Amino acid sequence: QVQLVQSGGGLVQAGGSLRLSCEASGSAAGIEAMGWYRQAPGKRRDMVARLIKSGVRLYGDFVKGRFTISGDIANNSVYLQMNSLKTEDTAVYFCYLRVADRDYWGQGTQVIVSS
């Protein structure tokens, strides 16, 4: 069983920055991808950023160069640096991991961006 532990997030003013961290433990050998999704109230869960085992980084269209995903899949860790935050970035952010064709999710962390 894979466990994902997230940290970071919180309250920040528009234009500010936050950093999210996620570490995986358990049966996480052979990770295919790690990343971040977010879900605002009443909305679907959207991909924010994904780090593929090959090193490819994918971002949601709304990121527009403001966020950077980093990490070391071999060491089961992924980070999300969020800059120039906007009020519309307010959501619960979930760490994501894919291994052996299964998806795993972190517990979620709230990010609130105030105007």
Image (cartoon, rainbow, N blue to C red):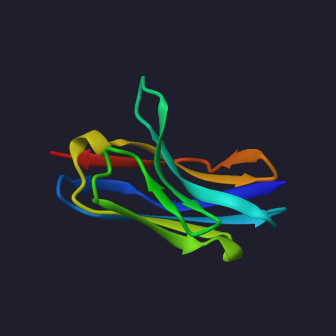
Name the residue furthest top.
Answer: 42
Is 53 displayed left or right of 61 in the figure?
right
Decide which of 30, 77 is in the foreground and name it.
30
In the rendered image, the vertical position of residue 91 relative to residue 23, given as above or below: above
Residue 42 lies, in percent from the top left, at 42, 23
- The mark tally for this picture is 0
Quadrant where the image shows the C terminus: top left
Decide which of 40, 73 is in the foreground and name it.
73
Residue 36 lies, in percent from the top left, at 51, 52
In the image, what residue occupies the spot 49% across and 70% down?
70
Quarter of the image where one finds residue 30? bottom right
In the rendered image, the vertical position of residue 41 relative to residue 62, given as above or below: above
Is 75 displayed left or right of 22 in the figure?
right
In the rendered image, the vertical position of residue 45 relative to residue 55, given as above or below: above
In the image, what residue occupies the spot 40% across and 34% down?
40
In the image, what residue occupies the spot 43% across and 26% down?
43
Residue 65 lies, in percent from the top left, at 28, 59
In the image, what residue occupies the spot 32% across and 51% down?
63
Residue 18 lies, in percent from the top left, at 34, 63
Quadrant where the image shows the N terminus: bottom right
Is 76 displayed left or right of 59 in the figure?
right
Is 59 displayed left or right of 98 in the figure?
left
